[in-house]
Image (cartoon, rainbow, N blue to C red):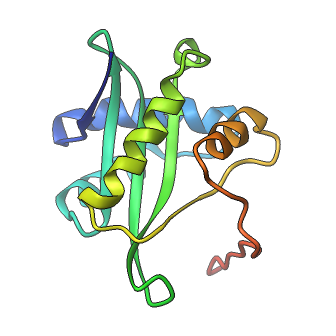
């Protein structure tokens, strides 16, 4: 059985260690002090989003984060599925599918109009997971700007 527990202050060390594992997959840099501070801010301001630990058999096997944005195009609050991580031993067991289904169920609970996500070009398993859950490739290009 899969259980989703909303992340609290007592989970900060655990969530940041899971983030380190996730970021290591694609060699993304992570500063644990910054991530801890960001998570403290995130979980104290419900307008920013929601995050959950993923449990099976009372063991933490991953996490999922939704961040919120207001969109005029979509007529209200939308979400970005910012991160979904499952530990290596938890992959290939249907937990990703159950997690995506849980996130889809949150649409009405959180009054969301739309959910976006990014997936690495090389991550075919994640792409298949999202497509199987009726996510579609967007017809626009995602662009970004980072102040220098």
Residue found at x 68% / y 58%: 136
Q: Quadrant of the C terminus?
A: bottom right
Q: Quadrant of the N terminus?
A: top left
Question: Seen in the image, is 89 located left or right of residue 52?
Answer: right
x then y, percent, for residue 90: 52, 16
Most extreme residue toward the bottom is 72
x then y, percent, for residue 26: 71, 39
Residue found at x 72% / y 75%: 143
Residue found at x 48% / y 41%: 100
x then y, percent, for residue 12: 28, 38
For the residue pair 82 and 15, the one nearer the viewer reads as 82
x then y, percent, for residue 80: 49, 62
Q: Is residue 55 above or below residue 147?
A: above
For the residue pair 49 and 10, the one nearer the viewer reads as 49
For the residue pair 132 and 147, the one nearer the viewer reads as 132
Q: Is residue 35 above or below residue 100?
A: below
Q: Is residue 5 above or below residue 30?
A: above
- Picture quarter containing residue 15? top left
For the residue pair 110 and 87, the one nearer the viewer reads as 110
């Amino acid at each position: 059985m899969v259980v989703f527990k909303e992340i609290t202050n007592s989970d900060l060390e655990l969530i940041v260690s899971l983030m380190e594992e996730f970021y290591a997959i694609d060699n993304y840099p992570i500063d644990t002090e910054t991530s801890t501070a960001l998570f403290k801010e995130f979980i104290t301001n419900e307008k920013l989003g929601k995050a959950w630990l993923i449990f099976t058999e009372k063991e933490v096997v991953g996490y999922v984060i939704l961040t919120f944005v207001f969109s005029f195009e979509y007529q209200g609050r939308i979400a970005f599925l910012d991160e979904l991580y499952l530990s290596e031993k938890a992959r290939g067991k249907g937990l990703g599918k159950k997690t995506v289904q849980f996130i889809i169920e949150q649409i009405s609970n959180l009054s969301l109009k739309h959910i976006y996500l990014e997936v690495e070009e090389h991550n075919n398993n994640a792409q298949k997971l999202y497509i199987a859950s009726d996510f579609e490739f967007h017809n626009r290009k995602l662009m970004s700007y980072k102040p220098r």
